[in-house]
Amino acid sequence: MIRIPDYPATRGQYVRLTRAVREACDRLPLGESILRVPTILCAALYILCLIALAAQRDTRIVRAVAVPAACFLAATALRLWIDRQRPYDRFDAPPVGRCVRGKGRSLPSRHTASAVAIACAAAYAFPVWPVIALAAVLSLVIAALRVACGQHTALDVIAAIALSVALSAVGYGM
């Protein structure tokens, strides 16, 4: 049996991790707002890919829209079914950035699932190394930030990555 780490696993780990990220953000000119940049860049990359496909009248646009939508819907459905508490509720400690207490639904991470789905869509639509590398790096940074900011645990993001990669492999016939 494979054991997937669930970090942070204790309140102490959670507090140390989020404190370190919060202190780092305090030293930056944009503060916690800087943490949104990878998500914005990922969305911009996806929009540019869709615009390029539409401009070329490329039929791959159908899959490039449908597969990420399926990943988002699957992640949402799993979250509702699993109903796992977010780390900041489980450990009763504030995350970095905004949060809604008692909202639960942490597994899988929808931000991570969407970012990985977008990375797979970009790689499918434009299979060149610069696009693939940019999309992969952005999705991994988003996954890491979801844990580092205390919004999710490692298990939440690993599950999201696996879900989106599996659905993308099926959706794109890889």
Image (tube, rainbow, N blue to C red):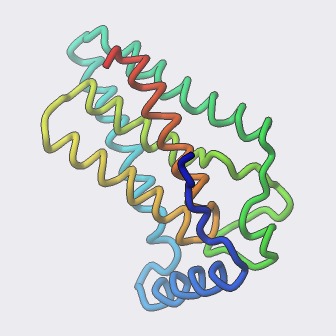
Left or right side of 43 for 105: right
Q: Residue at x 49, y 39 (%)?
A: 162
Q: Residue at x 46, y 22 (%)?
A: 67
Q: Quadrant location of residue 74? A: top right
In-front residue for pair 67/9 = 9
Question: Percent position (x, y) of residue 18?
Answer: 59, 80
In-front residue for pair 129/11 = 11
In-front residue for pair 68/98 = 68
Considering every residue shown, the one lying at the far right of the view is: 102
The quarter of the image holding the C terminus is top left
Question: Percent position (x, y) of residue 41?
Answer: 36, 52
Q: Residue at x 27, y 20 (%)?
A: 53
Q: Is residue 141 above or below residue 62?
A: below
Q: Is residue 70 above or below residue 2?
A: above
Question: Percent position (x, y) of residue 46?
Answer: 36, 36
Q: How many numbered tags mark residues here?
A: 0
Left or right side of 4 for 98: right
Left or right side of 40 for 147: right
Q: Residue at x 53, y 35 (%)?
A: 163
Q: Quadrant location of residue 37? A: bottom left
Question: Percent position (x, y) of residue 152?
Answer: 63, 60
